[in-house]
Image: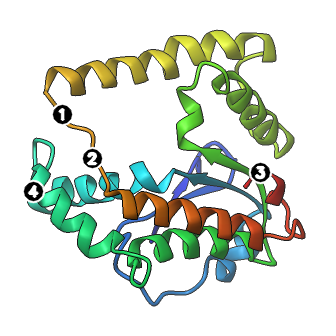
Amino acid sequence: KRCHSLNLKSGYDGVTCEIVHPIVPCKRPSPSAQAANFGNVVLVALRNPLTAFPSYQQEKAEKYHNAKEQVSKEEWISFRDQYVGNSTHSPLFQEWKEFTLEWRNMDKYHVAMYLAHEEWADETKGVALVTKFARVLREEGFPIQYHTDDLACLWHNNILHSAIQMRKKHEDEGRYVPEYTEKQKNFLAAELRKFASELDNTRPGDEQL
């Protein structure tokens, strides 16, 4: 994982951490080692494994292999079967789960909100997500330039509009939707249900998972 400090000139301390190598374990200091430099509130971005895994592959292809187009179906299937795997060997799902648990279980931080990727452009959930996101930032002292009543308009004109444009661009490019075998879908669904049952609502944000 790699971290970037933001807003240093504005007087507001914040940091974003992104996954650079989603399938390559890295030995590095835990983010808890930097706890003294930041507040204890964390916003964790999550994505459904079904769309997260092909996104990992695509991002890696663009970042390291200068890919300009979507990876081929053959490349996706090879990647999927190797890393999504099956009920006895699924390194990607384990990485996804460990990422979530790592942030959830850090004693020096608490998760104020899980930001679900799928909800940003959801016409039912999008406004609620942005409204809560703004509230958390405001409570932590970050400046919010829009009033609460304006957030729905902001979401519609920027986030939803951008998502629609991106979907159209992908359609015009003829992009396919990465698919899974029935066994893989059933396995991932079972693992997600199992993961949910393991959470005991003892950590902040558990009710959102």
- Earlier along the polypeptide chain: callout 4 or callout 1? 4
Q: Quadrant of residue 14?
A: bottom right
- Name the amino acid, label 3: Gln
Side (left or right) of 150 relative to 207: left
Q: Which is more toward the observer, 93 or 193?
A: 193
Does the CB distance between marks 4 and 2 fall below 8 Å?
no
Between the C-alphas of marks 1 and 3, the distance is: 32 Å
Judged from the image, the secondary structure of the residue bearing numbered disc 1 is loop
- Name the amino acid, label 1: Arg
Quarter of the image for the N terminus: give it.
bottom left
Does the CB distance between marks 1 and 3 fall below 8 Å?
no
Q: Which mark is residue 175?
A: 1
Q: Which mark is residue 74?
A: 4
Does the CB distance between marks 2 and 3 fall below 8 Å?
no
- Name the amino acid, label 2: Pro
Q: Nearer the viewer, mark 4 or mark 3?
A: 4
